[in-house]
Image: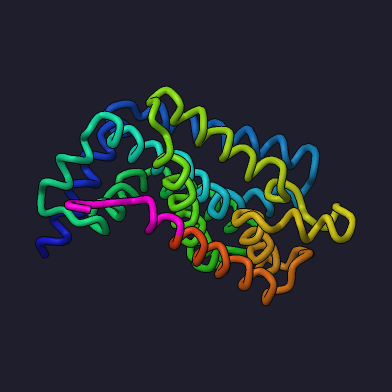
Amino acid sequence: MRKLHRIVGVAVLTSRWIIRQPLWLFQVAVFTLGFLILLFAWGGLAAVINLALLLVVSGFWTLGLNIVAQDYGWNRIMKLDEMFIASPVTLSDYFIGIILGVSLYNILFIASSALILLYLDLIHILPLLVMLGLIDLILGSFIGLIAVLRVRNPTNISAITNPLSTLTTILPPVYYPSTILPYPLNKVACIVPPATLMEVARGIAGLPTSLSPLESITIIIGWILLATLALSRLMTWGRE
């Protein structure tokens, strides 16, 4: 119970900026609606299905890589992390609390995806999408933290995480199908985590993919091992 209280405390503190300025959520809602109209106009039903998938899979990746990493980065620059380190809060409490603190975005992504999937009669795949999204959220957080831990100038935090988020979602086959790329570029382009997990999501939804399930699982396991090893060497807590 004490661990839960610590996690909730970190989550409440982390979410204050979202609650105090809900226009951030309004911006996400307008962006989602606009993208839905745009993709349907240019890509038809297949593009709408892809949007429902990426709202969860890619949306969670962006939260981890950008927002979670930025929150920790700013806390570290402003020495707020020392307040948590000096308290009974553990590293796992802190990490889970930050993720829960930005979960308002997650709920919005899941709700938007659920409405689209319900209309398309694909609502049964939503639990699997959420599982893929959570994997992407954790991986994105790890990779974002690795980048942020090397930042010394506070003005460089967003300048690093924002382009990194764009680079890993816009160029690889996340918003577009990998099958339009020639072999072997289609497989190489799917190496980044959000593209790999989008391949899994497309397979679940019945869309064509370039990676086999075994290839996707192998890539994701490799990323998890590499990111965990790198982060464990960089991130310290307490007397460490």
Q: Which residues are magenta?
A: 230-240
Q: Residue at x 44, y 53 (%)?
A: 142
As drawn, the residue found furthest toward the bottom would be 214
Q: Quadrant of residue 36?
A: top right
Is residue 159 visible to us here?
yes
Question: On the rendered image, what quadrant is the N terminus found in?
Answer: bottom left
| Residue 49 location (% of width, % of height) | 68, 54
| Residue 115 location (% of width, % of height) | 54, 52
Q: Is residue 66 above or below residue 123?
A: above
Q: How is the image coloured?
A: rainbow
- How many labels sit on residues? 0
Q: Quadrant of residue 7?
A: bottom left
As drawn, the residue found furthest toward the top would be 155
Is residue 53 visible to us here?
no
Q: Is residue 135 magenta?
A: no
Q: Is residue 81 above or below residue 133?
A: above
Q: Residue at x 23, y 53 (%)?
A: 240
